[in-house]
Image (cartoon, grey):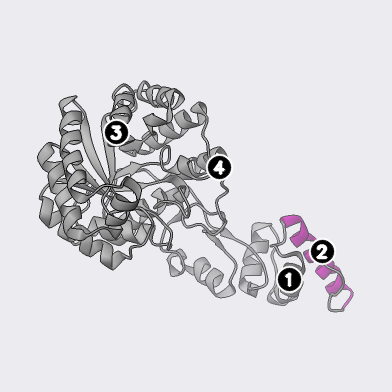
Amino acid sequence: MTTGKTANTIVINDTTLRDGEQSPGVAFSLGEKIAIARALAEAGVRELEVGTPAMGEAECDSIRAIAKLGLPVRLMVWTRMHQADLAAASVCGADIINLSIPVSDLQIHHKLKRDRAWVLETVDEMVRMVVGRGFDVSVGGEDASRADEDFVQRVARTAQAAGARRFRFADTLGVLDPFTTADRIRRLRASVGDLEIEIHAHDDLGLATANSLAGAAAGATHISTTVNGLGERAGNAPLEEVVMGLRHLHGVETGVDMQHYLAISQLVARASGRAVAVNKSIVGDAVFTHESGTHVDGLIKYTRNYQNIDPHEVGRQNRLVLGKHSGSRAVIHGYAELGIALQEGEARTILDRIRDFAVIAKRAPEPAELQRFYLESSSAFTAGKHPAGSID
């Protein structure tokens, strides 16, 4: 990292149970919330944003239930800068209250019907009040990415002077790129000294992870994530991508153990009703699956030829499949795993069958089908003719 960060200096604040659940149609039961919170805590996530108290008593009950678990995490709740929101949040058992307020002129004028002076006055008043009640405070700068940069810095300094420990820089509509993110966070860092900065990125342009990493490199201390990238519209920065990106690209650890992360991914997928795409990085079914003949040949010789992440690091393993793009070496290797030794000529003949099958069936053949191809090919060789026929 360009900031000279050392191990465990970037804190993951996972918001699966707040922003993730705001995905249209997603609603976790209390049991699911508790299971997700436990799993994330056991994996080493140090902060969880667990809900919005203003939603009502049922939401507050679920937050209190998570607080009563005594997990080794700090719990955050999200509120607007409203007295009613603060009243609800203050009895939920959370450690950190995120006070959110729009900071872009667009939202200040068209959403709040207010002006910049009102925002600064409100931030100062509300932060002092909540800090006075014994809570740690994060001020969430909603729509910070579309706001005037100097004004964002003024809001952050106002929050800091009032006693806030953190400013959340929210790319609410996912409009930033990594270069702009880095510039904005770097200048914000210079403006606020040692105030904690959290980068909260949305994935509308597919850049949430890149923007989160750029923000961390530029001085952010915390990164907001969700499991599987769950969240409104295109979602938030995926926890799995951020943790592995920090580790492999920047040598920075977050304290999150990825060995059992696949189970967390699957838990959230079931609870949310949002299936994980097969080609989703880190957790997708196809991520460590290889078919291309060149790649499989290289992997057989030395796995790092075509795989930079060891699948065991994230509780996965390699899977080699046979299909249209396989080569004869892959066929020999695949059949060897079935206990069948092939000669080169047999492998080339069976490969033709496999390729035909893949085109028609739109999938890789199962072991039973591979065995059938072998038996049929063996019979044809015994009869002295090249095998042909149907692949059904």
Q: Earlier in the sequence, mark 2 or mark 1?
A: 1
Q: Residues within 10 Å of mark 3 (few under 14, many from 20)?
A: some
Residue 152 visible? The answer is: yes
The quadrant in which residue 123 appears is top left
> Where's residue 167, x and y in %?
22, 46
Q: Nearer the viewer, residue 105 or 242?
A: 105
Q: Secondary structure at mark 3?
A: loop
- The quarter of the picture where the C terminus appears is bottom right
What label sits on residue 82 in the rendered view? 3
**Disc 3 vs disc 4: Cβ atoms closer than 8 Å?**
no
Give how far apart the Cα atoms at labels 3 and 4 are.
26 Å
What's the magenta bit mostly, secondary-structure-wise? helix
- Find disc 2 in the rendering and name its residue: 375
Q: Check disc 4 and report its element: helix, strand or loop.
A: loop
The amino acid beneath tag 3 is His
Residue 131 relative to residue 37: left or right: left
Task: Give the labeled residue for mark 1.
Answer: 359
Judge left or right: residue 278 versus residue 307.
right
Q: Earlier in the sequence, mark 1 or mark 3?
A: 3
Earlier sequence position, callout 4 versus callout 2: 4
Q: Residues within 10 Å of mark 1 (few under 14, many from 20)?
A: few
